[in-house]
Image (cartoon, rainbow, N blue to C red):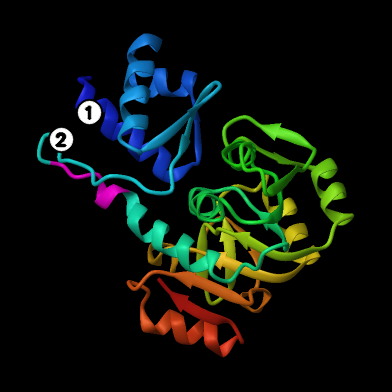
Amino acid sequence: MKAPARHLKIRELLDTQEFVDLETLCRELDASESSVRRDLVQLEGDGVLRRVYGGALTAAVREPVREVNGRDSREQGHAEEKRRIAAKTAELIEDRQTVILDGGSTVAAVAHALRNRSLHVITNSLAIALALDDERQIEVTLTGGYLYPRLRVTLGPLCEQMLDGVAADVLIMGTGGVTADGFSNGNSLVVGSERKMIEVARKVIIVADHTKFGRNAMIHVAPLEAADYVISDSGLAEEYQELLRQQGVEVLLA
């Protein structure tokens, strides 16, 4: 696989998760560690990602993806929509609030949009904690629990026990799918911690681009009325906007 194709594949991986480890990149790209490291250096210079120990973090703002062999990377995996959603979400957050940030690439974009703010962030995402580690005005509390290697999030009984002892002003959470039945997630392991986050937050903000609507992921997380806000992009169909409003959810489009 030549360098342009490797760069495209790295972008695609970071569109679906906010952290990718070096071992996974070498395996997915069928490339040597030295080649992958050179790719990461170049992509970091382009603003696509941030290199951290053991791999790479997604960046909130990405450059347009160039075509490789006539193929465009699904409009960079809706990265521009995620950036706009993140900026709109940040407008709802007040200084000195306690904010829970769940894992996921859209929430990672929100974390970047909240930089230079005075906040207390609670997160189960190692990638988000690392993204905010040099922010002097943001205090970061990382939940305990089992560190799930593939997603780099903590979960399990210890994570839920820690969350049970906090109170947050706002939760910002992504979702695997949105239907009339509610919000859902394709990973059964993280559902327990997500439900606990919803329980301890006074305001719940769900961030999701329009492709998540009409999709019912494997595990039900919460009904639609559990959210106070849903923030999506302008591609969201009117039928889903109306469905949310009927459940008392405020819909904002970025």
Is the residue under label 1 in contact with that under label 2 (CB below 8 Å)? yes
Whether the magenta-drawn stretch holds residue 74 is answered as yes
Residue found 10% across the figure and 40% down from its top = 70
Residue linked to disc 1: 5
- The quadrant in which residue 249 appears is bottom right
Q: Quick one: SS at disc 1?
A: helix
Q: Quick one: SS at disc 2?
A: loop
Residue 160 in the image, given as x and y percentages of width and height:
82, 49
Tell me if mark 1 has few (under 14), some (14-19) or many (20+) residues whose alpha carbon lies within 10 angstroms of its own.
some
Residue found 38% across the figure and 48% down from its top = 61
Report the magenta residues as a range.
71-76
Residue linked to disc 2: 68
Residue 124 in the image, given as x and y percentages of width and height:
69, 44
Using residue 130 as the reference point, say whether residue 234 is left or right of it.
left
Residue 121 in the image, given as x and y percentages of width and height:
70, 52
73 to 1, vertically: above or below: below
Whether the magenta-drawn stretch holds residue 221 is answered as no
